[in-house]
């Protein structure tokens, strides 16, 4: 679901933004094209299609914004989003654009973030991910174990804050052979409260990966990924 993220830092809701005249520094994330729409293409063409559609979304977002300086996120060939300074009141309408997946508010001019009633702690969370290739059901499978740092009041909150990032992490992409690949979350493995001091303030928004390891395992049917085939492109 689309959202304007980090508003809770100022005690705001999306409905209240229309009353504000403040400028804000925000980060737009482009909506990733539906991978199902490229399955009918030959594998080598799928990646080109995804990149072309991301470039089209980036141009659509750029055209919808008023003139002004901006920072492109991602690469020229495959943009991921944009950082801009804009009036806060414009954000709900911009979130509705088809090209936009979400908006993250980094700062609001003239407003100081609220102090948290309970100071978050720094947690180190270990999780396992399976590298799934479409229709692969046998052979060896890579498994990644990641350790991420995140600020949260307790272990359960840390896990819940990480789950949305795992959904984005599992977004399918096309490898060099044109095959769909995703890094699918499987399980939380361990957790540890870290004595990080001021570092916790830097980690309040999302997890910071501090360690990653990929391993190979025998690919069993329960670990396979079998996406439905799409109809031929029209």
Image (cartoon, grey):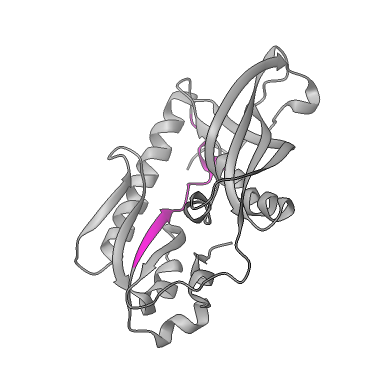
Q: Residue at x 75, y 27 (%)?
A: 223
> What's the magenta region?
25-41
Q: Residue at x 59, y 23 (%)?
A: 213
Question: Is residue 61 shown left or right of residue 187?
Answer: left
Quarter of the picture containing the N terminus is bottom right
- Please tell me whether residue 88 is drawn above or below residue 170 in the rendered image: below
Question: Is residue 211 shown left or right of residue 227?
Answer: left
**Of residues 34 and 42, the one drawn nearer to the viewer in this rendering:** 34
Which quadrant would residue 85 be assigned to in this image? bottom left
Q: Residue at x 33, y 78 (%)?
A: 110
How far across and how far down the image is residue 114, in percent? 50, 74
Which quadrant would residue 63 be assigned to in this image? bottom left
Q: Residue furthest bottom?
A: 19
How far across and how far down the image is residue 84, in percent? 29, 62
How far across and how far down the image is residue 58, in percent? 33, 52
- Please tell me whether residue 166 is drawn above or below residue 200 in the rendered image: above
Question: Is residue 54 shown left or right of residue 159?
Answer: left
Which quadrant would residue 2 be assigned to in this image? bottom right
Residue 181 is one of the magenta-drawn residues: no
How far across and how far down the image is residue 164, in percent? 61, 51
């Amino acid at each position: 679901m689309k959202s304007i993220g980090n508003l809770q830092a100022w005690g705001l809701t999306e409905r209240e933004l229309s009353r504000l005249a403040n400028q804000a520094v925000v980060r737009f994330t482009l909506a990733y094209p539906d991978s199902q729409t490229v399955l009918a293409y030959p594998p080598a063409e799928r990646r080109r299609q995804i990149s072309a559609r991301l470039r089209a979304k980036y141009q659509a977002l750029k055209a919808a914004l008023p003139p002004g300086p901006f920072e492109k996120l991602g690469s020229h060939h495959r943009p991921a989003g944009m950082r801009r300074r804009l009036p806060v009141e414009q954000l709900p309408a911009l979130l509705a654009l088809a090209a936009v997946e979400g908006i993250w508010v980094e700062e609001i001019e003239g407003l100081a973030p609220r102090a948290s009633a309970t100071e978050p702690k720094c947690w180190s969370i270990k999780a396992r991910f399976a590298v799934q290739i479409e229709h692969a059901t046998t052979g060896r499978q890579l498994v990644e174990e990641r350790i991420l740092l995140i600020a949260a009041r307790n272990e359960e909150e840390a896990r819940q804050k990480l789950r949305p990032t795992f959904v984005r992490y599992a977004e399918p992409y096309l490898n060099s052979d044109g095959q769909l690949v995703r890094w699918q979350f499987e399980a939380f493995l361990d957790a540890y409260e870290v004595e990080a001091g001021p570092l916790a303030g830097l980690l309040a928004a999302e997890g910071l990966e501090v360690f990653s390891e990929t391993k190979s395992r025998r690919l069993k049917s329960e670990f396979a990924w079998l996406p439905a085939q799409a109809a031929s492109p029209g």
